[in-house]
Amino acid sequence: MQDFQRYVDEGIGPFFKEESERGRIRLRQVPGHGLFPEKQSFFLEKQPGRRRVIVLGESSALLLAQALSRRVREEGLEGRVEVVNMAVGGSDQEQALRRFHEALSLSPDALVLLFGHNIFFQLPFRYCDPAWLRPILRRARQSRLLGLIRQRMSPLPPFKEPLRASSRLKSYSAALSLMAELSRRRAIPLMVCTVPGNLHAPPMIDSSLRAWKDFSLGERLYDAGRYEEAFRALSRAVDEDFRRWRVFGAVNETTRGIGREKGLVVLDFERMARRRAPHGIPGWESFSDAQHLWDFGWEADEILRRMGLPAPGRRAARAARNPLSPALGNVLAVFPVGDASSCAAVVSFARSYPQAGAREMEHAAIDRGEGPREAAILTACFAKALRCDGRAEEARGLDAQARLLDPAIDISRERWACGGPRRKPSP
């Protein structure tokens, strides 16, 4: 709780503070919480011929900015491009808007906004509150009068029910339109990005029955080679998941629509991810979890290309995948071992590693299982993944290993199905 309070408090204040250094103004990053980017420091005055690009948004934007900085170094463009990372992990749309206002004062040559997974996030208070009101709100967050004052002074329309899609989309649309207008007045190019998501990640354990049914249907259609139908079913599962922990279709459509209407530069990362993915369905081959791409290098290259800077374009070789065992750790950080979501996620994840043999899967399960029972469950999930891919002989070996770890495990239970449970799982 104390760590979260630090995150909130640092999110309220300025992102950079000014310091005088040899007659020049140096900007130093203030937030130091782990969800903020690494400490940054630079002079407000830009070097001649060097373009300043500021990246804003949520945790995916933070990773994008890091990848963009890396590509700039690899291509030897440090003298031509300066990347400023103002993205914040766990950011809500109100905080993103607040950071946008601050970024306008830093003399940017281009702004990049990537936001969508956190559309339903709403931190304890709104970051677009005027500066004089924030200290008061920190001391009296429960005041109804102050809440009414805050809504009246906010540049965004109020929303009464934070988890209702229509209200959050309306608020997001208003924020995006406001950013477009402010950047137009200052003649600063604004690049808005659609956000890709992992369609092979299952819904959460307590999500709706409809989401689970569509996810199971999508996985079965994928197995049958009916990929367009599978894409539609898996996309519906994301839209119907009331936990709203991934970007859903209406968010990206809003970004595209506002971008076209306001004449912004639209970077369609969601469609880029589809073009790269097997059969046009992004999954574990591209993502470390349900939201975050393994590698934002392709997206960073696209930004450099749009700016007219030399970039390798579509690289011939894909970025190397992480080894199976550490990658499995990322999956288990989201899905606890043993529930239906975890089983469906691990099966789907394992099938993204067709080059992995049964022995490697066995080692990964034992390494990542917190005990014999958990290791047996993971081994059984890997066996199911091999069986779904027609590798029955290898699957039998993993079944035997699962029974060795836990003789009581029931591998025939419905939860080991390729597409997750056929009915709503019990809590």
Image (cartoon, rainbow, N blue to C red):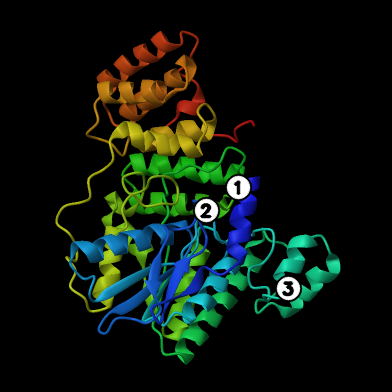
- Which of pointers 3 and 2 lies earlier in the amino acid sequence? 2
Q: Determine the CA span between mark 1 and mark 2.
A: 8 Å
Q: Determine the CA span between mark 1 and mark 3.
A: 23 Å
Q: Residue at x 62, y 72 (%)?
A: 171
Q: Is residue 397 left or right of residue 262?
A: left
Residue behind mark 2:
33
Asked if one can make out residue 419 in the rendered structure from this viewpoint, the answer is no
Kind of element beneath mark 1: helix
- Which of pointers 1 and 2 lies earlier in the amino acid sequence? 1
Crowding at mark 1 (Cα within 10 Å: few <14, some 14-19, many 20+):
few
Kind of element beneath mark 3: loop
Q: Determine the CA span between mark 3 and mark 2.
A: 23 Å
Image coords of residue 369 (percent x, y): 43, 23
- Identity, as a three-letter code, of the amino acid under mark 2: His
Image coords of residue 377 (percent x, y): 45, 22
Residue behind mark 3:
133
Residue behind mark 1:
3
Position of residue 226 relative to residue 388, above or below, is below
